[in-house]
Image: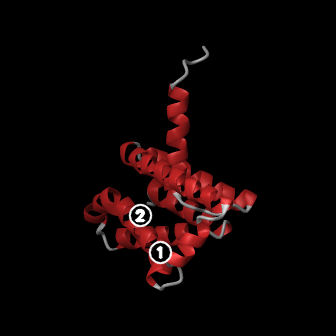
Amino acid sequence: MVSSSTIFLIILFILGYIGKNQSIMIAVYVLFGIKLLKMDEKLFPYIQDKGLGWGVTIITIAVLVPIATGEIGFKELSESVRSFYAWIALAAGIFVAVIAKNGIELLATDPHITTALVLGTILAVVLFQGIAVGPVIGAGIAYLVMKLMDMFPPLS
């Protein structure tokens, strides 16, 4: 008999396929592979605990590649700070990084939020031709909105 988690993963894979979200499809493949090899009881807790950190490290490496290749250097940095738009981008980068930090905290303390974030990302890709930027920034935005809502008493 097929488990509900398997059905859920198949649905996520189909939605990922429809939305052309390669990351979701690869993630489902990897998870199915781990399950088929019967390594899920050992690996899933470890991946759940350490996976977000690995992902952030990989993204950071990707962002730093232009510096490592010499494509971006001190000359480009000094030229960019002369632009008003660069200051906006700098502020946005700081803002998003701080929000993402809170998103990782939210995902670690409230993992069921991940499901809603992944579903929201897939729906945005499928229905609105959005770009899947991942659940971390979504969790950060959700965290920010939740904290803002906590500042006000309920209406009822």
The image quadrant that residue 14 belongs to is bottom right
Q: Residues within 10 Å of mark 1 (few under 14, many from 20)?
A: few
Q: Residue at x 61, y 16 (%)?
A: 155
Height in image: 121 above or below 75? above
Residue 22 in sight in this render: no
In front: 42, or 5?
42
Q: Residue at x 53, y 50 (%)?
A: 95
Q: Residue furthest right?
A: 128
The image quadrant that residue 61 belongs to is bottom left
**Spot occupied by residue 84 in the image (x, y as percentages of width and height):** 67, 59
Q: CA distance from mark 2 to mark 1?
A: 10 Å
**Spot occupied by residue 153 in the image (x, y as percentages of width and height):** 54, 18
Question: Which type of secondary structure does the marked residue at label 1 adopt?
Answer: helix
Count of labels in the image: 2
Name the residue that disc number 2 marks: 56
Name the residue that disc number 1 marks: 62
Name the amino acid, label 1.
Answer: Ala
Q: Residue furthest bottom?
A: 69
Q: Residue at x 56, y 37 (%)?
A: 145
Q: Residues within 10 Å of mark 2 (few under 14, many from 20)?
A: some
Earlier-in-chain disc, 2 versus 1: 2
In front: 124, or 137?
137
Does 50 sit left or right of 119 as displayed?
A: left
- The quarter of the rendered structure image containing the N terminus is bottom left
Name the amino acid, label 2.
Answer: Val
Height in image: 3 above or below 150? below
Residue 68 in sight in this render: yes
Question: Which type of secondary structure does the marked residue at label 2 adopt?
Answer: helix
Does 127 sit left or right of 72 as displayed?
A: right
Contact between marks 2 and 1 (CB within 8 A): the answer is: no
**Spot occupied by residue 54 in the image (x, y as percentages of width and height):** 36, 66
